[in-house]
Image: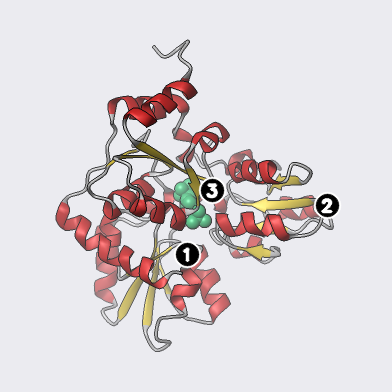
């Protein structure tokens, strides 16, 4: 029974005792973002996990992110407050089906979004994040045929932007799929001068209206540089916490779903992590991410390729 415990103070105590670093994604609850040692996008979090000299990484994000941390830092204990924090993109790409798809296209390399299982990383050639995908794609020989998975929206966006024809795996993020073009246009009619920033996991009908498309970090940087006092944000709305902290005088509006508000765009997997579960994870050092060594080494190759090719 945790009632009466000062969770923030307990987490701080345990973080010191365990020599732990708390890493959090921008989609985490504000109270978790506020206590984290580092808040970032998928690429920055991978780099932090690789570079840390802490003994324990408490990863406040989803499972594929915590697994990435373990792949890159195998000697650390990596805990994820709730092991059920999955991802619809990961679920859309079962490794056996992905292996079959690859076998059907032996002359293609697999460029794969980091939002996938460790098994799918092990079946891939190069991993990308939304902040590194374009830069990595530009370094691949134009004659090289490419399979891109599992996010067909990010893949489609990259194909339109770069003119590269890629074979797309048909996965989607349920959160970004839920934005409504009709409701977005209604909102823009009320705020005609407000720019729209969108994550490339959004479908093309949403991206077509965006003034800026980029990763969570990219969207945050755009928010800081764009003129005007209002910004419409088409990604998971918890990122708005960082914007409000950095720019208290500006208004940030989460892009709406079909019901006209942004609450249906909260990631249900990210939301599983709570202060209580983070406290227990630091106290008990469980649930722990463990990866079989052969699989880890295989998955590490495609992640290392990303870290080498991304600036
Ligand atoms: P980035 O933080 O890399 O933009 O990724 C967003 C995301 O969907 C995480 O699930
Ligand atoms: Fe996965 Fe989408 Fe949630 Fe990101 S927001 S973790 S892509 S379900």
In the rendering, which numbered label is found on residue 191?
A: 2
Q: Residue at x 38, y 31 (%)?
A: 15
- Whole-percent x, y for residue 290 in the image: 22, 43
How busy is the neighbourhood of tag 1: few (under 14 within 10 Å), some, or many (20 plus)? Answer: many
Pick whichever of labels 1 and 2 is earlier in the sequence: 1
Q: Quadrant of the N terminus?
A: top left
Pick whichever of labels 3 and 1 is earlier in the sequence: 1
User: What is the CA distance from the residue labelled 2 to the residue labelled 3?
Assistant: 23 Å
Q: Secondary structure at mark 3?
A: helix
User: What is the CA distance from the residue labelled 1 to the residue labelled 2?
Assistant: 30 Å
**In-front residue for pair 71/51:** 51
Q: Residue at x 54, y 46 (%)?
A: 26
Q: Residue at x 39, y 89 (%)?
A: 143
**Pointer 3 and pointer 1: residues touching (CB < 8 Å)?**
no
The residue carrying mark 3 is: 175
Pick whichever of labels 2 and 3 is earlier in the sequence: 3
């Amino acid at each position: 029974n945790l009632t009466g415990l000062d969770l923030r103070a307990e987490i701080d105590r345990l973080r010191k005792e365990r020599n732990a670093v708390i890493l959090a994604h921008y989609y985490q609850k504000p109270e978790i973002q506020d206590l984290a040692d580092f808040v970032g996008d998928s690429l920055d979090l991978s780099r932090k996990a690789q570079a840390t000299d802490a003994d324990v990484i408490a990863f406040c994000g989803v499972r594929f992110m915590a697994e990435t941390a373990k792949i890159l830092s195998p000697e650390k204990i990596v805990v994820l407050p709730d092991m059920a924090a999955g991802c619809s993109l990961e679920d859309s790409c079962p490794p056996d089906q992905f292996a079959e798809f690859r076998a059907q296209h032996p002359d293609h390399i697999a460029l794969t979004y980091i939002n996938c299982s460790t098994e799918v990383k092990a079946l891939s050639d190069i991993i990308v994040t939304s902040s590194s995908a374009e830069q990595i794609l530009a370094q691949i020989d134009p004659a090289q045929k490419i399979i891109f998975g599992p996010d067909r929206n990010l893949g489609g966006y990259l194909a339109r932007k770069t003119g590269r024809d890629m074979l797309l795996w048909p996965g989607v993020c349920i959160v970004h799929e839920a934005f409504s073009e009709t409701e977005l246009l209604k909102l823009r009619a009320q705020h005609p001068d407000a720019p729209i920033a969108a994550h490339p996991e959004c479908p093309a009908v949403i991206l077509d209206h965006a003034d800026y498309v980029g990763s969570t970090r990219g969207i945050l940087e755009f928010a800081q540089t764009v003129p005007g006092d209002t910004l419409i944000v088409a990604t998971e709305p918890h990122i708005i916490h960082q914007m409000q902290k950095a720019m208290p005088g500006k208004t940030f509006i989460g892009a709406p779903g079909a019901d006209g508000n942004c609450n249906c765009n909260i990631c249900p997997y990210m939301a599983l992590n709570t202060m209580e579960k983070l406290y227990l994870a630091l106290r008990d050092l469980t649930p722990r991410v463990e990866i079989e060594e052969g699989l880890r080494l295989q998955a590490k190759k495609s992640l290392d390729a990303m870290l080498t090719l991304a600036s």
